[in-house]
Image: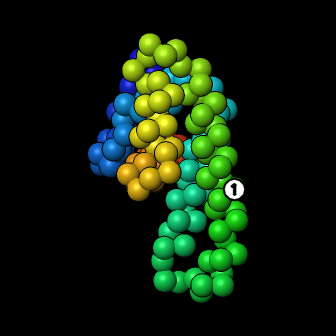
Amino acid sequence: MYSSELLDKIDNWSKNKLVNLDDLKFIIDNSSEEEFKQIIFTAKFLKGMLNILTGNKASKTEKMKLIPEYTKNISELTDNLKTIISRTPDSDEFTPDYFQNKYLDLNQTSMQNFTSLISDLAICKDYFNDQKS
């Protein structure tokens, strides 16, 4: 399958940094090219913002100004993922409940998993950017 080959290339390029390979494959297989491009763009943006928000270079005031934009993009990414997931039959291994429990619930484990998925999606964006040059 195309997604498996693509993920192998991305994982090799990233020196095996991808963590959520099966979930990434599901996202690629169930999204249009345009949806996937939007998802990885948003993830790359969120990863950069998270680096600023958790780093020491920006002042507290500057960080506070970024929070609404960060929140807006988290919501956008979540909505895009929910749209893709909603197309899945309940008999599929990757049911909406699976993604909800793993990535979208409001608990510490889900938030850590969501951050990990964002990182994987940002790596995908980095790969495509690198291929353009």
Residue 37: percent from the left, percent from the top?
Answer: 62, 38
**Residue at x-position 67% and y-position 46%:** 76
Residue 80 in the figure: left or right of residue 23 = right
The picture quadrant where one finds residue 79 is: top right
Residue 121: percent from the left, percent from the top?
Answer: 49, 45
Q: Is residue 119 shown above or below 69?
A: above
Q: Is residue 90 shown above or below 24?
A: above
Residue 26: percent from the left, percent from the top?
Answer: 46, 27
Colour convention:
rainbow
**Residue at x-position 50% and y-position 51%:** 106
Secondary structure state at the residue bearing disc 1: helix
Tally of marks: 1
Residue 102: percent from the left, percent from the top?
Answer: 41, 40
The outermost residue toward the left is: 16
How busy is the neighbourhood of tag 1: few (under 14 within 10 Å), some, or many (20 plus)? few
**Residue at x-position 59% and y-position 86%:** 59
Q: Is residue 75 shown above or below 4?
A: below
The picture quadrant where one finds residue 115 is: bottom left
**Residue at x-position 66% and y-position 71%:** 66
Name the quarter where the N terminus is drawn: top left
Who is closer to the viewer here, 75 or 43?
75
Kindly tell me whether residue 56 is visible in this rendering: yes
Residue 130 in the figure: left or right of residue 39 = left
Q: Amino acid at mark 1?
A: Lys
Q: Which residue is mark 1?
A: 72
Who is closer to the viewer here, 101 or 5?
101
Kindly tell me whether residue 116 is visible in this rendering: no
Residue 5 in the figure: left or right of residue 16 = right
The picture quadrant where one finds residue 85 is: top right
